[in-house]
Image (cartoon, rainbow, N blue to C red):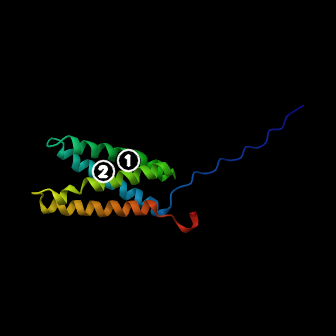
Amino acid sequence: MSATIPPETPAAPARRSSLLARTGLVLAGLLALGDIQTSVSQLPDDPVVPGVLIAVSVISLVAIPFAWLGAKWARNVVVVVRVLAALSAVPAFIAPGIPTEWIMMAAAGIVLSLVAVVLLLVTPRGAR
């Protein structure tokens, strides 16, 4: 008796993120790299806040490839990290003595973070 082995069905291809989500991921990655770059220069003055921002930015950079491949948990991690990074820039508007250039950079970072979050959370019509 010879047993017949059914042909293997190919695994379902990984569902990649939409173009909007991929654009948001690229923007989030660039913002995370910028956060790391600006935070490293602030480490000698105050190691706590820049250290935390570096840590969450690294978490974001680790999650981005998984989100690119369609993992919803990773997309949610990137969204939460971008919101936390945007909130970390709010004291620039409140604290006295902050240079105008830094306030403008903080405002741009908040706006770009919100754009990245919206791009990551928008669902294309065909995916509903």
- The extreme left residue here reads 97
Q: Quadrant of the C terminus?
A: bottom right
Dots 2 and 1: beta carbons under 8 Å? Answer: yes
- The extreme bottom residue here reads 125
Q: Give the labeled residue for mark 2.
A: 33
**x, y (%) of residue 114?**
35, 62
Residue 7, compared with residue 19, is above or below; it is above
**x, y (%) of residue 91?**
20, 55
Residue found at x 17% / y 46%: 42
**x, y (%) of residue 36?**
27, 48
**x, y (%) of residue 106?**
23, 59
- The extreme right residue here reads 1
Q: Quadrant of the N terminus?
A: top right
Amino acid type for the residue under numbered disc 1: Leu
Residue found at x 24% / y 56%: 89
Left or right of residue 89: residue 113: right
Residue 70, numbered circle: none
Residue found at x 13% / y 63%: 100
Q: Give the labeled residue for mark 1.
A: 61
Left or right of residue 67: residue 15: right
Amino acid type for the residue under numbered disc 2: Leu
Q: Secondary structure at mark 2?
A: helix
Q: Secondary structure at mark 1?
A: helix
